[in-house]
């Protein structure tokens, strides 16, 4: 193998794949990345056997070849090289020679034969979604995913395909978020219509990092086959296992009618909840929200040993007065991902799920494609 | 050779040529999905294994397969979907999705509310008060359990039920849970054996999720712990259980506990737990009398929609005395045999069919050694102590109990007993009279004697 490429390209590609190289020591080959030349391109592959990432860059190939290189070593070296220089790479036996102007290195490598083969999709893409939208979905959903793996289904985001919509749902059984995305229906999409899959949160975190480096209008091709999911973004491919399991039928718990609707300034509410949570226990904190007229909402919290706090906020309420108790952490998680000036809180009573929605500033109507639900604490 | 054995043999061969981590990584959770006309399809858990086995290991696998089955032509892999694995049934017949899934919105009083998607109580809906046969032996226990199910947390808390194996403790315990669920399906009910409790605790310590573990139990509206005696000697479990017990007790949540012996007889149990167990209602389930056993058999027969004549029922009831589970087992065996032969059973046939059960049930003769060992074990003494001439109460009482049991169970004569202990026959006579009197007066000695006697069988 012999080739020349720019430091910038190399760095970009290696930083994409480097992160998932496995920390597990049972199979040492997984701590390596596979470098491979093909069709005038240099291909980087890495996997931890749950996720696999392949990244391609342009390079001037003088001699074909492939080799497994210790990931941390080569990325630490390449990242510190000067930006403007070209990198010359030549493989001699199992030693990779890297020359970059004044800097030279020799890296001991492993046989590429032992490197796992990363599965590639056979079929065509089943749907596409714009980078911008996908990022938004992931950002809004991830915080609701359970960190506890007692219920494996909850450690991922559930995608259900109905009509020409995809519903992304995430829950840890204390709160739930659902994001609805419309897609253009095509023939291939029909194959997965009316089904659902659960994508591990870890995969989406990796994907999110990659999406952040892509341009906003780039399209992500998503393919689901053989219990695996494939994402293609520009020159990067990700493949991941899906979570085995059945997502609970969460739709039933979303109330369809509400006794009260409260329009409130999100920033003010966020701030008052942050302040109120100072006066609560760190875990299992409780804040009390009281609405006794159509214009005001009071956020209260108290802690026997510390003291208490109270904030009054202006609101616009329709319907009955309400008085309920929430865990501030779950409310904050929800408010933090809602990127609007105003939001709407919809309540039935102090024991039924409470629904949060984003409000469009221009026409003051709720945006219905994202909802965030919290269970109140029964008092 | 079936597919499972074939694959085991192949794996055995492949394992030799690979490093352990490699073997585990690529061959874990694989199995033969189908094997037809020399074409073998291997089920693999993920895409990585599929690629690897198909591209790098194909020839090795074919070679290994050919050693056992000559007509192998090709090997391919398929990723199995999760539903297929548990039953290993690929005809589609085994595609059961794990039970009915209901959603329950759930919020507990003080702790973080939880959306409860599944009711997971471990309760068996078969056990209800309706299907419980009441007899003299269990009347009180049943009444206590029923009262608890009507007013959980207020009437008898904690409720402690003890009795020998197979007398219906679990049935009563689960009935409480089912009854409460019936009136309020949103109640958070946890039913677990103390063994399961310990295992879960150990896991949570390992995974450092001990807070989650405590939380789970502290959120219960009703906590039922079966066979608590296994907690004996497990200090950490007792410790954690103590705290859970206290916090539930303070919140007026019902706690129900069962054991095969009263709290005072559970060895190596912390005093603070013992006293708490004794603080509520303690009730026992005794051995059922003949009429109760007959009634139980009738109920079970009705459930099975099968008919047996009274003589046969009486025969079973008379011969199996101590364990309802065995009673049911005998009945099952009988019913199964006759359903197979499609004819009405006679008493002679019944005797023949049940002979194996009855033989193993025949009480093996108790020996002097058995009695001595039980006594020694119970009082934690050595044989030297027992045979010594010491007249300290610590030794004298066990010695008297031994003599008493020699007389009562082995029908030994007083001189014989005296000789055995190198004492006068009047000593033996005195011992027998003293213990008999104690038993009549229902002192602590009486429960001790009964306990030792039970451990003999």
Image: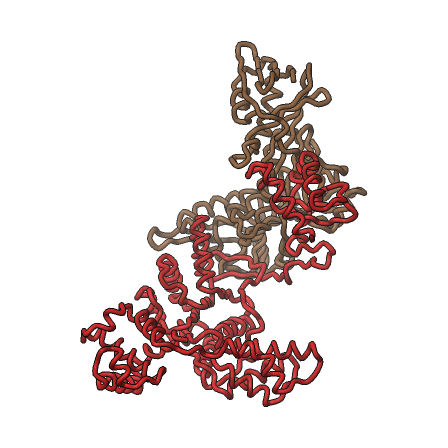
Chain colours: A brown, B red
Furthest residue toward right = A187
For the point 43% across and 59% down, the residue is B198
Picture quarter with the C terminus of chain B: bottom left
Farthest-out residue, top: A102
Classify residue B275 as left or right of residue B67.
left
Residue that appears at 58% across and 55% down: A346
Compared across the picture, whether A225 is left or right of B444 comes to right
**In the image, residue B69 above or below residue B171:** above
Residue B439 vertical placement versus A124 (above, below): below
Residue A195 at x, y = what percent? 72, 50
Q: In this view, does B453 lie to the left or right of A9?
A: left
Q: Can residue A370 be seen in this view?
A: no
Count of numbered circles in the view: 0
Task: Tell me if I can see residue A311 in this picture.
Answer: yes
Q: In this view, does A378 lie to the left or right of A6?
A: left
**In front: A103, or A323?**
A103
In the foreground, B219 or B232: B232
Q: Where is residue B120 in the image (x, y as percent from the top left)?
A: 55, 62
Viewer-proximal residue, B268 or B193? B268
User: Residue shown at 25%/83% (left/top)?
Assistant: B428
User: Where does the image place residue A363, in percent across and percent down from the top left?
Assistant: 66, 45
Q: Where is residue B167 in the image (x, y as percent from the top left)?
A: 48, 77
């Amino acid at each position: 193998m012999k080739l020349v490429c720019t430091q910038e390209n190399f760095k970009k590609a290696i930083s994409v794949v480097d992160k998932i190289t496995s920390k597990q020591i049972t199979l040492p080959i997984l701590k390596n990345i596979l470098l491979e030349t093909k069709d005038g391109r240099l291909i980087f592959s890495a996997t931890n056997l749950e996720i696999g990432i392949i990244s391609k860059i342009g390079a001037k190939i003088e001699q074909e070849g492939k080799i497994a290189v210790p990931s941390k070593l080569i990325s630490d070296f390449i990242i510190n090289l000067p930006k403007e220089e070209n990198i010359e790479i030549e493989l001699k036996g199992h030693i990779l020679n890297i020359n970059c102007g004044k800097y030279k290195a020799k890296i001991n490598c492993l046989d590429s034969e032992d490197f796992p083969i990363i599965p590639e999709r056979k079929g065509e893409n089943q749907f596409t979604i714009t980078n911008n939208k996908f990022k938004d979905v992931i950002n809004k959903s991830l915080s609701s995913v359970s960190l506890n793996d007692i219920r494996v289904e909850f450690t991922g985001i559930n995608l259900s395909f109905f009509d020409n919509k995809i519903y992304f749902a995430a829950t840890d059984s204390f709160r739930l978020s659902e994001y609805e995305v419309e897609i253009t229906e095509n023939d291939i999409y029909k194959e997965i219509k009316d089904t659902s899959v659960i994508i591990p949160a870890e995969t989406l975190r990796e994907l999110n990092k990659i999406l952040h480096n892509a341009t906003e209008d780039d399209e992500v091709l998503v393919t689901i086959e053989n219990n695996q999911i494939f994402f293609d973004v520009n020159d990067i491919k990700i493949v991941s296992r899906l979570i085995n399991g059945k997502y609970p039928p969460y739709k039933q718990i979303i109330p369809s009618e509400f006794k009260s609707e409260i329009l409130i300034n999100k920033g003010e509410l966020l701030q008052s909840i942050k302040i109120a949570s100072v006066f609560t226990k760190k875990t299992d904190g409780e804040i009390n929200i009281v609405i006794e007229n159509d214009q005001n909402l009071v956020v209260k919290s108290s802690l026997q040993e510390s003291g208490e706090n109270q904030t009054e906020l202006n609101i616009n309420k329709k319907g009955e007065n309400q008085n309920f108790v929430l865990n501030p952490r779950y409310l904050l998680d929800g408010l933090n991902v809602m990127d609007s000036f105003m939001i709407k809180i919809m309540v039935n009573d102090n024991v039924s799920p409470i629904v949060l929605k984003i409000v469009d500033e221009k026409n003051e109507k709720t945006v219905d494609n994202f909802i965030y639900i919290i269970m109140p604490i029964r008092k | 050779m079936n597919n499972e054995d074939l694959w085991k043999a192949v794996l055995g061969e492949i394992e030799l040529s690979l490093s352990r981590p490699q073997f585990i990584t690529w061959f874990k959770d694989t199995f033969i999905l189908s094997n037809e006309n020399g074409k073998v399809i291997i089920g693999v858990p993920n895409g990585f294994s599929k690629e690897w086995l198909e591209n790098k290991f194909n020839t090795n696998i074919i070679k290994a397969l050919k050693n056992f089955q000559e007509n192998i032509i090709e090997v391919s892999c398929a990723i199995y979907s999760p539903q297929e694995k548990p039953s290993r049934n690929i005809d589609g017949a085994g595609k059961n999705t794990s039970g009915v899934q209901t959603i329950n919105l759930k919020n507990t009083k003080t702790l973080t509310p939880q959306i409860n998607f599944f009711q997971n109580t471990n309760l068996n809906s078969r056990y209800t008060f309706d299907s419980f046969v009441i007899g003299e032996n269990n009347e009180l226990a049943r009444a206590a359990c029923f009262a608890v199910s009507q007013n959980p947390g207020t009437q008898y808390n904690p409720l402690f039920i003890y009795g020998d194996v197979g007398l219906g403790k679990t049935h009563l315990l689960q009935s409480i849970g089912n009854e409460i669920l019936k009136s309020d399906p949103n109640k958070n009910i946890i039913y677990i054996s103390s063994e399961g409790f310990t295992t879960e605790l150990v896991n949570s310590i390992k995974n450092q999720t001990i807070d989650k573990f405590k939380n789970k139990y502290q959120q219960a509206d009703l906590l039922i712990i079966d066979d608590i005696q296994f907690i004996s000697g497990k200090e950490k479990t007792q410790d954690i259980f103590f705290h859970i017990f206290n916090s539930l007790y303070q919140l007026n949540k019902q706690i129900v506990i069962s054991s095969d012996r009263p709290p005072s007889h559970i060895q190596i149990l912390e005093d603070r737990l013992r006293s708490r167990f004794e603080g509520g209602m303690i009730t026992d389930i005794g051995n059922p009398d003949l009429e109760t056993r007959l009634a139980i058999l009738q109920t079970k027969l009705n459930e099975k929609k099968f008919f047996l004549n009274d003589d046969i029922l009486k025969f079973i009831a008379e011969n199996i005395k101590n364990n309802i589970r065995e009673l049911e087992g005998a009945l099952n065996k009988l019913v199964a045999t006759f359903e197979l032969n499609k004819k009405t059973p006679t008493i002679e046939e019944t005797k023949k069919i049940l002979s194996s059960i009855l033989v193993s049930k025949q009480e093996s003769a108790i020996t002097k050694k058995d009695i001595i060992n039980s006594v020694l074990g119970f009082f934690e003494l050595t044989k030297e102590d027992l045979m010594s001439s010491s007249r300290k109460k610590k030794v004298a009482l066990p010695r008297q109990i031994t003599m008493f049991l020699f007389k009562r169970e082995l029908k030994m004569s007083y001189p014989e007993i005296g000789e055995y202990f190198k004492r006068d026959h009047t000593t033996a006579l005195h011992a027998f009279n003293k213990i008999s009197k104690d038993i009549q007066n229902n002192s602590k000695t009486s429960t001790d004697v009964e306990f030792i006697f039970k451990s003999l069988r």
